Image (cartoon, rainbow, N blue to C red):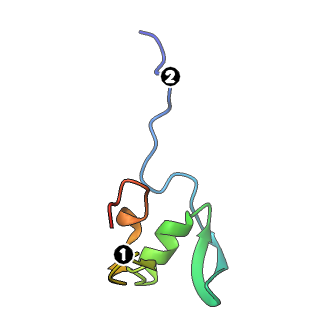
Amino acid sequence: MPEPRTPRRGPAHGVDPARPLTLTVDGEALPALAGDSVASALLAAGRLAVAPSIYLSRPRGLMAAGLEETN
């Protein structure tokens, strides 16, 4: 049986809990772990809104931060 092209990885693959660090986002220090993504650190810190909407200034989260978001 041939080897899979991509290795199976768990949800925390690459995150090292033994190496905590601090990220600074918009002047706010957030705890994170080495190998963690900025998005994951924002969510873990309870920061759900990352930017206001263009027209009505409603809070937008990480999932609405792309170009496909119409407002």
**Quarter the C terminus occupies:** bottom left
- Identify residue type, mark 1: Arg
Please tell me whether residue 48 is drawn above or below residue 71 in the rendered image. below
Locate residue 65 relative to residue 69 in the image: left or right. Answer: right
Image point 51% across, 73% down: which residue? 41
Please determine whether, in this image, residue 24 is positioned above or below residue 69.
below
Q: In this rendered view, identify the residue nearer to me: 3 or 46.
A: 46
- For mark 1, does the 10 Å Cα neighbourhood hold few (<14), some (14 to 19), or many (20 or more) residues? some
Instruction: Left or right? Give the position of 12 relative to 22.
Output: left
Q: Secondary structure at mark 1?
A: strand
Q: Nearer the viewer, residue 53 or 65?
A: 53
**Quadrant in which the N terminus appears:** top left
Q: Is residue 64 left or right of residue 20?
A: left
**Which picture quadrant has residue 63?**
bottom left
Which circle marks residue 60 in the picture? 1
Report how far apart the C-alphas of labels 2 and 1 lie in the structure.
Answer: 36 Å
Three-letter amino acid code at disc 2?
Arg
**Residue reaching furthest front?**
55
Q: Position of residue 11 (x, y in %)?
A: 42, 53
Residue at far bottom of view: 28
Q: Position of residue 65 (x, y in %)?
A: 43, 64
- 67 or 48: which is nearer to us? 67
Label 2 residue SS: loop
Q: Residue at x 46, y 43 (%)?
A: 9
Which of the marked residues, 2 or 1, is nearer the chain's N terminus? Answer: 2
**Labels 2 & 1 near each other (Cβ < 8 A):** no
Q: Nearer the viewer, mark 2 or mark 1?
A: 1
Kindly identify which residue carries mark 2: 5
Q: Residues within 10 Å of mark 2 (few under 14, many from 20)?
A: few
* Residue at x 47% of width, y 57% of height: 12
Residue farthest to the top, as pictured: 1
